[in-house]
Amino acid sequence: MSYIKAGTDASGNDIKLFYQDLGTGAPVVLIHGWPLSHEMWDYQLAELPAHGLRVVAYDRRGFGKSSQPWDGYDYDTLADDLKAVLDELDLQNVTLVGFSMGGGEVARYMSRHGGARVAKVAFISAVTPYLLKTDDNPDGVDQEVFNEITTNLKKDRADFLKTFGKQFYGVSLLSQPVSQAHLDGDFARAYVASHKATLECANSFATTDFRDDLAEIRVPALIIHGDSDKTVPIEASGERTANALPTAQYIVYEGEPHGLFVTQKDRLNEDLLSFILEGVSVRETVGTTTIY
């Protein structure tokens, strides 16, 4: 198995990040969402390398096969972990693809490390620019929502993860966009994560303000979000990220939930390939209509 060292913990033990490195060509780094691991990118890892791309996906500290230190789950540290991946593999002209929580790592890396080694960025169902509702962020999500997540994780993490998985993909009595087998697989991926990491990362993506980070992005950007996302509502995230990056390509997946990397896996693969290989369609606004 392949690991990258990302510093040491308070006891001097190495913090190791597990990664997969597939294909050859222009590099793409996939950053997974909470509370999963790099294995969430199964359908992307099976397709993107077939198109002349080198695709790297790694487990965030505390998740998957990576080390589970007691601390280091703030976005500054997580952005430094991403830097360790890019530096250790000596990747150049990279496309960073961040899903959900991973979108925050993309944004913070671009500001904290000046966008070094990065040619393009993609935000998929991302938590940017700022989820928490505050006086200067009235369109955010109420603190009580995040308090409930913390309470339920502490009460019964397994039960929370089972329930959360259904919301993640928009599963209901009438809608079954993914199989029970897939939900079971996601539960297994999420449950092996550190309890502490799961709690701390939930707090990080809920309370971290990325508005200044987005202002530092100077490379082509892609934003994809489902308008039926109940986990990271598009009104508080995708739409506002698009407003913050007015030249970015913004694609709304109508009727899609948070986990569109599975529910619309083929379309997402096509859109990512188009963005990475063919360039960017810059938005133009005519009246109230956005065109490409």
Image (cartoon, helix red, strand yellow):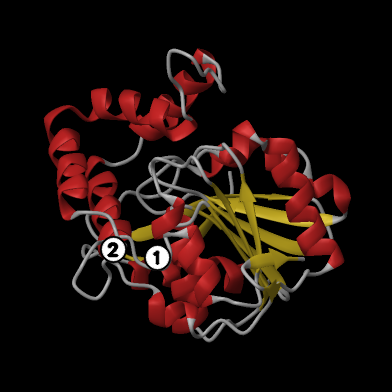
Name the one closer to the observer, 145 or 198.
Answer: 145
Which x, y percent locates residue 24? 83, 57
Horizontal relation, residue 121 to residue 5: left or right: right
Q: Amino acid at mark 1?
A: Leu
Which x, y percent locates residue 275? 77, 62
**Where on the picture, by quarter, is residue 268?**
top right
Residue 149 circle label: none
**SS for dot 1:** helix
Binning the other alpha carbons within 10 Å of mark 1 as few (below 14), some (14 to 19) or many (20 upward) gives: many
Which x, y percent locates residue 283? 71, 72
Does any portion of residue 150 appear in the rendered image? yes
Q: Label 2, on which residue? A: 72
Residue 78 circle label: 1
Task: Please tell me whether residue 108 is drawn above or below residue 223 in the rendered image.
Answer: below
Which x, y percent locates residue 141? 27, 55
The residue sitting at 39% across, 54% down in the picture is 61
Does any portion of residue 16 appear in the rendered image? no
- Whether tag 1 and tag 2 are in contact, CB under 8 A, the answer is yes
Name the one closer to the observer, 222 or 99.
Answer: 222
Task: Please tell me whether residue 179 is drawn above or below residue 65 in the rendered image.
Answer: above
Real-space Cα distance between discs 1 and 2?
Answer: 7 Å
**Where on the picture, by quarter, is residue 272?**
bottom right
Q: Amino acid at mark 2?
A: Gly
**SS for dot 2:** loop
Image quadrant containing the C terminus: bottom right
Marks 1 and 2, the one that precedes in the sequence: 2
The residue sitting at 53% across, 17% down in the picture is 176
Name the one closer to the observer, 93 or 212.
Answer: 212
Image quadrant containing the N terminus: top right
Q: How many marks?
A: 2
Name the one closer to the observer, 174 or 290.
Answer: 290
